[in-house]
Amino acid sequence: MTVNSRPAILGQNQYGKAENRVVRITRDGATHHIKDLAVSVSLSGDMAEVHYSGSNANVLPTDTTKNTVFAFAKEHGIESAEQFGIHLARHFVTSQEPIRRARIRIEEYAWERIAAPGADGSGHSFVRKGQETRLAQITYDGSSWEVVSGLKDLTVMNSTDSEFRGYVKDKYTTLPETRDRILATSVCGRWRFNWTGDEQHMPSWEQSYEQVRTHMLRAFAETYSLSLQQTLYQMGARVIENRAEIDEVRLSLPNKHHFLVDLEPFGLKNDNEVYLAADRPYGLIEATVLRDGCEPRIPVDLTNL
Amino acid sequence: MTVNSRPAILGQNQYGKAENRVVRITRDGATHHIKDLAVSVSLSGDMAEVHYSGSNANVLPTDTTKNTVFAFAKEHGIESAEQFGIHLARHFVTSQEPIRRARIRIEEYAWERIAAPGADGSGHSFVRKGQETRLAQITYDGSSWEVVSGLKDLTVMNSTDSEFRGYVKDKYTTLPETRDRILATSVCGRWRFNWTGDEQHMPSWEQSYEQVRTHMLRAFAETYSLSLQQTLYQMGARVIENRAEIDEVRLSLPNKHHFLVDLEPFGLKNDNEVYLAADRPYGLIEATVLRDGCEPRIPVDLTNL
Amino acid sequence: MTVNSRPAILGQNQYGKAENRVVRITRDGATHHIKDLAVSVSLSGDMAEVHYSGSNANVLPTDTTKNTVFAFAKEHGIESAEQFGIHLARHFVTSQEPIRRARIRIEEYAWERIAAPGADGSGHSFVRKGQETRLAQITYDGSSWEVVSGLKDLTVMNSTDSEFRGYVKDKYTTLPETRDRILATSVCGRWRFNWTGDEQHMPSWEQSYEQVRTHMLRAFAETYSLSLQQTLYQMGARVIENRAEIDEVRLSLPNKHHFLVDLEPFGLKNDNEVYLAADRPYGLIEATVLRDGCEPRIPVDLTNL
Amino acid sequence: MTVNSRPAILGQNQYGKAENRVVRITRDGATHHIKDLAVSVSLSGDMAEVHYSGSNANVLPTDTTKNTVFAFAKEHGIESAEQFGIHLARHFVTSQEPIRRARIRIEEYAWERIAAPGADGSGHSFVRKGQETRLAQITYDGSSWEVVSGLKDLTVMNSTDSEFRGYVKDKYTTLPETRDRILATSVCGRWRFNWTGDEQHMPSWEQSYEQVRTHMLRAFAETYSLSLQQTLYQMGARVIENRAEIDEVRLSLPNKHHFLVDLEPFGLKNDNEVYLAADRPYGLIEATVLRDGCEPRIPVDLTNL
């Protein structure tokens, strides 16, 4: 049977082991360091036959990709999520002829030390920070790299300095305008580095992440907001303007509505003091901010991993 | 300030109200019918200014898009998720000049009647089916339509007739080959209709969904599987071959591993009887199956909504 | 150091391995049967020393309790969740002197066959039902048994025949009375059997579960409801009245509010047709229904497992 | 119909509105303060009739209890979760004759300021801490109080100084002993105050919470652990010994297993460096630690709210 005779043709495909939860301990004398990751591997290449006939002759088992993640944590250590993903992606593409592209996605969970003054154990006791989850995606096709870092679940709020006025009114519009509201969102962001080749100087991944996070938080805090779109743009633009290693930022910002509760039926005046935090529905504002002259590559819809 | 002078340029953007939970009751005498949806609206168009300066002059509030969902449930009813999305998308694009594209995403939760023989209440009492969640995405740009339907969380299992052998072994491979394993997955699928214009005959959305679901389940059940990729292809191909209204299927199939438990330390033989169902990590097999000659349009990474 | 000198004394304690996901396949020729459980073991007894000094001399490792679950799935099969729990609880209490009480909690996930007419594979292909999760808790102290079965996440709705009127009004009351509303809830229930000793005739666990579930669904459907409390009582009472093996029912019923949407601003009349399904806050109605003369033993607050 | 003639009798019951998400902003000039709570109300009392006949004559609607939460946030402010719950519980019991007992459960989400040096917005911009969720439960029956505070989802890890040896071995035991393992858990705790009457000096709720949390973290960090039970006892005892206002601590500690990965097949030695973080199954260690002479009152099974 030849491919041409099939009515149903195989298109893009990828496979691998998802969410390998690897924890790497590094010892600096009595002081320990933790890297805590969930690593997902996706491989593509010459894989038509396994789909059409079930032949696994080109298939490196997903179990092997899992083993490789844990072995590489020992062999290479985990300097940063991005660097670890680069080691893995390079390995799969260069060691297996049928594999033409590897994409590594990583979630990173941050830990901080438990402050225990005078305790012997202070060097190896940790509490999970629990704030945002850091993200990294590393893609390699044998010649060029794409690194997209990001974060999710970073929840922020401005309790004033946010308006919403001057919008379109149609027959279904009932929303009153406001000059003072709570603006809250859970930041989900991705940013793409312009590092694409081994011959280029590699960014400092850890420092870059901390700086991007700080710029976004400050832009959120410092923007007097006329709309969440404006705040979003400021957050993205601040990164582009301050971090030369980044060409593109994609942000997905749910508008976590805080409704001012009507207390008049109870003879009370609510002077922007008491709010109901609503779950659903929520506004959802999404946009890409690009360095002038660059092409967008981050998908419009951000996925969870 | 002109756009050209900015280092940071606005790229693709969209906004709207997400997860509007609308329940529509229709009465046929004493017999009631339910449609239970979560509807998410995303609008795009001439929206640069709200991002750059915060001017909302072109912005229909997300609250208005919410109101429209509920008003349309009354005005148009909900014949099917797809038909309802078509009404909404057409409305936003045709009624608001700055809006050039509307995308409506819908989750549908199925209910079945409570069997209560002889009870007066039998016509209006329901229990949620709770199996898969049905999905629909309707996109309209003022001239052509794209309808992608789908489902998620349909968990299936074959307790035999699955092998995994003949794969590549490298230095990190430890997995033994097997001629009899459990094959289980939670089907996440999307399929794109070739209906794109109002002048074309519109598919029967409800019937099409039931048929696609049945074809995928049967393909899963009837395929003697040498790899999950083979099963995936068969599921997609069965749809393409049997449903002329569909040109593209994208499937994302986590391999829900069931590990045969080693009972030998306890003097017991495990003859493919006792399995440990594992959570993470899991294999993840993803592919597109296309009608020959068609272009793929469904994104590689399926999002949750 | 003696116990008496401690300011801090050990109270009730229990330990074990939670959420052992065991899948048991039984073959009846080419026809396979599935039991799919999450089994949690909690053991209590002479365990003061492990808490005070860290001595594990009385501690059967939680890893061993896990192994026992899988070994027993082979040795005893899984006739029902309750019967399986009885085997396990008896084993731990009778085989380990320091263990005085064993409590086994089980979640069961139901599967149904994929209907694939004429297919060879029809006997071993399944789709997960996905409706409620069945629950069982078996406790044994070496002399008497307590079996509490239950379910969670069974979502039901009456689209009419529900009122809410005649309630107390205080200064914080703004809710209007209604003679026609949607009544929807997600049933979380537990019921206790009066089987307590090996010398008694053991109930038919599988049949009992199906019957209890049916009685509760019918009571929900058939009750013209003046309040969710009334419906709750009817659901519990129907079980007590019809199932002699059960002495106590505890129900926790969230009132899944469906708010009638005000469409008047859009010139539309909403004749109980269009509802907004809200997430939070929700009413929560909880009560025990007891066979007259029996003592309550199910805790007031139902836990998730 | 009299109650005596019923085969099915009403037992313990409670009702109210759950998960009212109230956010209270307090202004100190340009500096704002946030309290962010989910408040659940449960009322009990003379409620037989609403269950038996559906009469709501004694029922204060759950909607009214919701309104009261928001009104009280204005009227009384939210000094602490405990103090806010005391206001609410007292109100329901003293203002409604049929209500004999009120229980208020509260989840609190902590926020910290966004550090934005020199920014005007620094006083009203926040990022959610995202670590543990603080809990409070206040119960009042018209004469005496019970306050139980707590936390959940505080994830901690010791990367060494944990052994597990000297345990019971039976025929199902395969676990090897270890002198060096990772000990990690997600702390779920409750602690009961001995403040029970208005005539007593009320504890400083905010300070008490911070101190309890610190004592538990330090006990976790400083205990060389021979078993998780020992660590649990130390965490509870440290609170009892240092906080005179607390008589009882209940802890539920899942043993978040980190398995040392066998890298020998790849020619690598894993010197306690690379671990697989497992999800399920997990050990679950639960115990009460009591002040000597006090009675336990916290239920054995901790519920989620």
Image (cartoon, coloured by chain):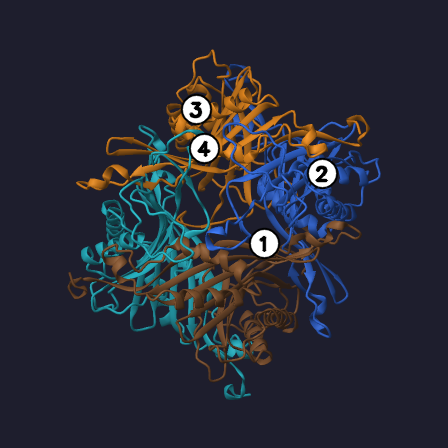
Chain colours: A brown, B cyan, C orange, D blue
Q: Nearer the viewer, residue C37 or D99?
A: C37
Which chain letter matches label 3?
Answer: C
Q: Residue furthest top?
A: C199
Circles 1 and 4 on the same chain:
no
Give the residue number, with chain letter if any, for mark 1: D273
Residue type beneath disc 1:
Glu
Q: What element does badge 2 sit on?
A: strand
Give the residue number, with chain letter if any, for mark 4: B265
As measured in the structure, the alpha-carbon distance from the residue carrying label 3 to the one carrying label 4 is: 25 Å
Circles 3 and 2 on the same chain:
no
Res A35 quadrant in image:
bottom right
As measured in the structure, the alpha-carbon distance from the residue carrying label 3 to the one carrying label 1 is: 43 Å
As measured in the structure, the alpha-carbon distance from the residue carrying label 4 to the one carrying label 2 is: 43 Å
Give coordinates of residue B188: x percent, y percent: 36, 54
Q: What element does badge 4 sit on?
A: helix
* Residue count near mark 4 (Cα–Cα under 10 Å), binned few <14, some 14–19, many ≥20: few
Residue type beneath disc 4:
Pro
Q: What element does badge 3 sit on?
A: helix
Q: Nearer the viewer, mark 3 or mark 2?
A: 3
Residue type beneath disc 2:
Trp
Tell me, yes or no, if residue D287 can be seen here.
Answer: yes
Q: Nearer the viewer, mark 1 or mark 2?
A: 1
Residue type beneath disc 3:
Gln
Q: Nearer the viewer, mark 4 or mark 2?
A: 4
Give coordinates of residue A122: x percent, y percent: 73, 53
Against A16, is C31 above or below? Answer: above
